Amino acid sequence: DAKTTQPPSMDCAEGRAANLPCNHSTISGNEYVYWYRQIHSQGPQYIIHGLKNNETNEMASLIITEDRKSSTLILPHATLRDTAVYYCIAQNSGGSNYKLTFGKGTLLTVNP
Amino acid sequence: DAGITQSPRHKVTETGTPVTLRCHQTENHRYMYWYRQDPGHGLRLIHYSYGVKDTDKGEVSDGYSVSRSKTEDFLLTLESATSSQTSVYFCAISGGPRAFFGQGTRLTVV
């Protein structure tokens, strides 16, 4: 599994877009980029995942660079409830391996 | 939300006693996982299962055993609890690339 690097913390103003970066320079061609978040004391929650195309769902957008060495998770209009630790994971989801390897993540604090 | 329930949610036990945590799912997903989360270490995989009676070790499996006799239940057992096993334990399920996590069990070994 490719190693990912994220800033330990970020701040964002409520109502503004939150852009969370992730570096995965050693990602291989069959590894997907996943984003999960963990709100204090709760279990992690899936946000989005992608291989090489940009993805959007009701929660967020995922922008993956053309060389796939980095990605950005975008929360378009952050709210106070988006304060959480955000995990970027690069993992092969093929075959039988759906195990997730979590790093330290980014603590996003949304301020009023 | 996916149907996944952990029990108990909180437990205090004494060193040396056996403890079993239960994860129950109603989604009929093939894969089930047990993680532990500790300050400074993040989430670490203990054991996982890829079907009934099919289990394998994760990165921190020492001192833990698991069993899966039914699709819906995945049990984590601490044969003889130690203080180093004080942690928050999360169960997860997946039927594909998206995993769903339970609310966690806070275990304290005194």
Image (spheres, coloured by chain):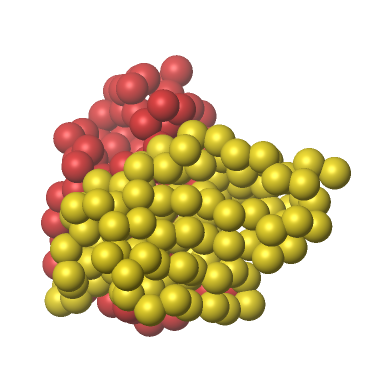
Q: Chain B's shade in the image?
A: red
Quadrant for residue B79, please give it: top left
Residue found 42% across the figure and 42% down from its top: A6
The x and y percentages for residue A53 are 38, 79
Quadrant for residue B52, please give it: bottom left
Residue found 25% across the figure and 52% down from its top: A25
Which part of the image, by quadrant, shows the C terminus of chain A? top right
Residue found 63% across the figure and 62% down from its top: A75
- Taking depth in this image into account, of B23 and A56 the one nearest to the observer is A56
> Can residue A91 be spotted in the picture?
yes
* Chain letter tied to yellow: A
Relative placement, left or right, of B52 versus A58 is: left
- Taking depth in this image into account, of B93 and A67 the one nearest to the observer is A67
- Taking depth in this image into account, of B13 and A66 the one nearest to the observer is A66
The x and y percentages for residue A50 are 38, 73
Relative placement, left or right, of A6 versus A91 is: right
- Taking depth in this image into account, of B104 and A18 the one nearest to the observer is A18
Residue found 25% across the figure and 61% down from its top: A91
